[in-house]
Amino acid sequence: MRCILSLLLCVLLAAEPSVAAFYYPTAQVSLLDHILVDNWGAYASNFSSAITPCTNYVTEVGEPALISGRTTAAQWIRVAFHDYVTANVTAGTGGLDASIGFETLRSENSGSAMNDSFTFWRPFMNDAVSMSDLVAIGTVMSMSLCGGHKLPFRPGRVDAMAADPTTGVPAPETDLNTTLLYFARAGFDRSDAIGLTACGHTMGSVHHGGFPDVVPVSAVTANNTNGGINFDTTRGVFDPLVVHEYIDWTGHMGGPLVTTDNVTTRSDLRLYESDSNSTMRALYAQGEGFLDTCVNLMGRMVNTVPSGVTLGDPIQPMLIKPINVTYDFSTDGNLTLSGRIRVLTSAGETAPSYLTLKAGSSNQQLTSEAETGTSVFGANIKSTASAYGTTTYFPFIIAGRQTAGAKSFTISWPGRKTATFPIQDDVFVVPSATEISGTVINATVAARSGINGGAYSIQIAAPTAQMGTLGPKVIRATLNMRRLPGMNDGYALWQGSVDLGKVPTGLVSVSVMREGATIDTFMVNPGAAGW
C-alpha cells in the first residue's frame, strides 16, 4: 500500500502537489513513526515543535506565549487524563477515545487545554491516525521530549462519536471518597491514584482563569497573564521534583492544589495525605526510578480503551524507512519510481555515506542529502532523552521500465543486513493526476495493459469537521470511474471525481479496492495536514 507522507509540510501550509508513497509496514505505523521519530530538522513532522522547548505554549506566538504561563506539554497530559478518567473498566466503556472533545462545556473540563490541544492535533488526524491515538501520543511525546523515560506507544484507538455519558473528573473541590471512587471506576486504586497525580503534576501550573477558587487574582501579572502557579520549580521538565518539593516542603511544596488558602480546593493534599503520605514517601525514595513508575502509570492510563478495541504492538522506530517511494508518470508520460530512504542512527554512530538500492534490473548507489534531522530516538538509548539520534535521507529516481513487474526492492549498506520492501506496479493511484480542489476529489488510477481497471472500485475516506467537537470524523464515498482514451507507457488510465460537500481537515485516502481487498492506497494532502 502507499500513501502521502509529505514531510516538508507544516500545519496549515497552502496546498502542495500530491505525492504517493508505499506504507511500511502499514499506513498507521508509518505515519505514527513519523510523529515519534522525525522530531527536528529535515522533514520534521512539526508535531514536536509544539513542545519545543517544553515550556512552550503553542496556541500563541512570540511574547504573548512567553508571558502566558501556560505549558502545552502539561496541557496534553491533562487532556489525556480527562479523557481517560471517566472510563468504567467493569462496564468496558470510556477511556482514551477522544470523547473529551464533546465534553468541553462540562464544568469538570474547565480551561482551554482541551480545545487548544484538539486545534493543534486535528490536521494530523485521518483514516489511519485517529484523534484518540493523537491524544495518547501527546502524553507519550510530552514525556519523551521533556525529560521523562520513554513510554511505548501502542496504536489502534477508536474515536467516540459522542460525549461519554459517564461524568466525574476529580476537581479541586471534590471530596476524597468521591475522588478515589472516580479513580477506582477507571481501574486505579489509592496508591495508583496518588502516583498518577504526582506524575501528571510534575509539569505545568494551575491558572486563575480556569480555577479562580484555587489561584487568586493577584497571580495575574504583566509577566504571567493567565495567573499560573506552578506545581514545582521546573514546570517544563518531567522529573521527580514535584514529589521532592512536597515531602521536603521546599520550592512550590507540591503546587497550588496542596498549598492554596482555599482549604476546600486542596485536592492533591487530601489525596497525598490519605495514606499518611506513605505513597509519596515511597515515590520520593525511588529517586529517578519515579520516572519508571510514571511510565507504568501513564501507560496504563493511555492504554485504557473501551472493550472491543484492541491496541497494536508498540511502535518501534524504523532504522531504515522508505518515504514517498512512489510510482508516477513523468511530464513526458514515462513511468518512474522515486522517493527517499530515511536512515536513523543512534547517538555516537556515523550515518552511512551511501546506500545501495536494487529494484528489478536497477542497481543504484544513493548518496545522502546535506540536511539531516534530529530524533529523540537514539537507537541504542534505553530510556532517557539526554542523547539523540540522527535521521539521514537518501533520494532516488528510477525509470519505471527497469522495475517492471518487480515485487520488492532492497536497501543495503556495508556492515548492515539488507532490508527488503514490497512494491507493486499493476494498479496504482497516479499522484500527479490526483488532487483536491476545495470539496472535490479528482482521482486517476493506472492499470497495466491486460488488467481490467474497471474491475476495481475506488474508495475515498476524508476527515471532516463535525458538530460538537474539534475532533474530525471520517466520511466515505465511492468514485465512479471512466476509462480515458489511449495508453500511458503501457498503462490504461481511469478517472473519477466526487464532491464531499465539506473541505477535508487532513490527509484524504484514495484506495483501490477489489473483492474487499485493498490493492493500493494514496493519501492526498488538502493543504491543511500536519504531514
Image: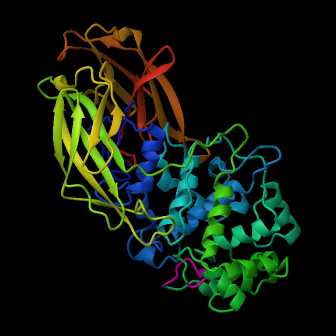
User: Which of the 4 quarters of the picture holds residue 247?
Assistant: bottom right
Report the magenta residues as a range: 223-233
Kindly tell me whether residue 416 is visible in this rendering.
Answer: yes
Residue 60: x, y in percent?
A: 44, 67
User: Which of the 4 quarters of the picture holds residue 442?
Assistant: top left
Q: Is residue 443 magenta?
A: no
Vertical relation: 277 (above or below) 524: below
Q: In front here: 475 or 209?
A: 475
Residue farthest to the right, as pictured:
177
Kindly tell me whether residue 201 is visible in this rendering.
Answer: no
Residue 428: x, y in percent?
A: 32, 23
Vertical relation: 174 (above or below) 377: below
Residue farthest to the front, as pictured:
415
Q: Residue at x 51, y 76 (%)?
A: 236
Q: Is residue 229 magenta?
A: yes
Q: In front here: 126 or 239?
A: 239
For the N terminus, the quadrant is top left
Residue 10: x, y in percent?
A: 35, 53
In the picture, measured across the screen, residue 7 lies left or right of residue 503, that is left
Q: Residue at x 24, y 55 (%)?
A: 352
